[in-house]
Image (cartoon, rainbow, N blue to C red):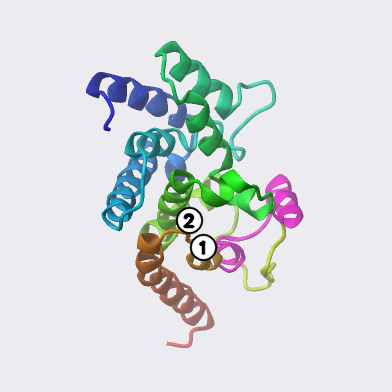
Amino acid sequence: MTLDPTFRKEAEGLVKEQMAAYDPSHDWLHVDRVRRQALKIAREESHQGKAVDVELVELAALFHDIGDAKFHKEGQPTGREIVMAFLSKHGYQKADEVAKIVENVSFRKELAGIKNEWAESCIELHIVQDADKLDAIGAFGIMRCAAYSGYKNRPLYDPAEKAQLNMTYEQYQAQTKANTGCAISHFHEKLFRLKDMMKTPTAIKMAQKRHDVMVNFVQQIEEEYSMDE
């Protein structure tokens, strides 16, 4: 099933309203890319014989950044609360399923290592996670990393800084809170890891090319800084 056009338009309106408070790395255009990517993956996985709820995928992809922890302020409603209020108002029967995916889609949640049968088996969750990761790597990933670093006033490249490889959830949380780490370190700490975190066969095939784009970019940065061209 696909979404009713009027319902889809209202859902998009909610997302545009929420994303207006975020920086360009998490704007409506990012969400729309993730939505389109998720639908592409869903179609491919369906063609391989997997049962995918495409309607659920589209809504979860649309709402995946609402209440993002990086932007959430104390006292504001959570992403789940916003999503549930909107979907309940429209009498949407799978509201809780959408909200559950939105709550669990982030890299931060995966890094926490919380595993359960639902998270291991929900293909709609995996599709939205993969679509979001794909937009975090490759050419768009490079631009988004620079945009977010600028928004947080972090250096683009600090050669004296040592990236925290194999960063734990606790280290990731501490770095976020302290607002430390340059843009290039972010490639080593997070973005280079995403290729191997893809879950669907479709995304696994797509990720290598985007990963290679990032590797070449970071190598070029290091060459230019060292004047070794």
The residue that appears at 37% across and 56% down in the rendered structure is 140
Mark 2 lies on residue: 146
Label 1: element kind: helix
Rendered position, 202 above or below 219: above
Q: Amino acid at mark 2?
A: Ala
Mark toward the viewer: 2 or 1: 1
The percent coordinates of residue 98 (x first, y second) are 48, 31
Location of the C terminus by quadrant is bottom left
Mark 1 surroundings: few (<14), some (14-19) or many (≥20) residues within 10 A: some
The residue sitting at 51% across, 63% down in the picture is 194
Looking at the image, which residue is at 69% across and 71% down? 162
- The span picked out in magenta is 169-191
Does residue 173 show up magenta in the picture? yes
* Residue at the spot of label 1: 194
Q: Quadrant of the N terminus?
A: top left
Residue type, numbered disc 1: Leu
Q: Nearer the viewer, residue 76 or 157?
A: 76
- Give the vertical position of 7 relative to 137 (above or below): above
Q: Is residue 201 left or right of residue 114?
A: left
**Mark found first going from the N terminus, 2 or 1:** 2
Neighbor class of circle 2 (other Cα within 10 Å; few <14, some 14-19, many 20+) is: many
The image position of residue 25, as x and y in percent, is 45, 46
Residue 200: image quadrant is: bottom left
The x, y position of residue 106, in whole percent, is 56, 46
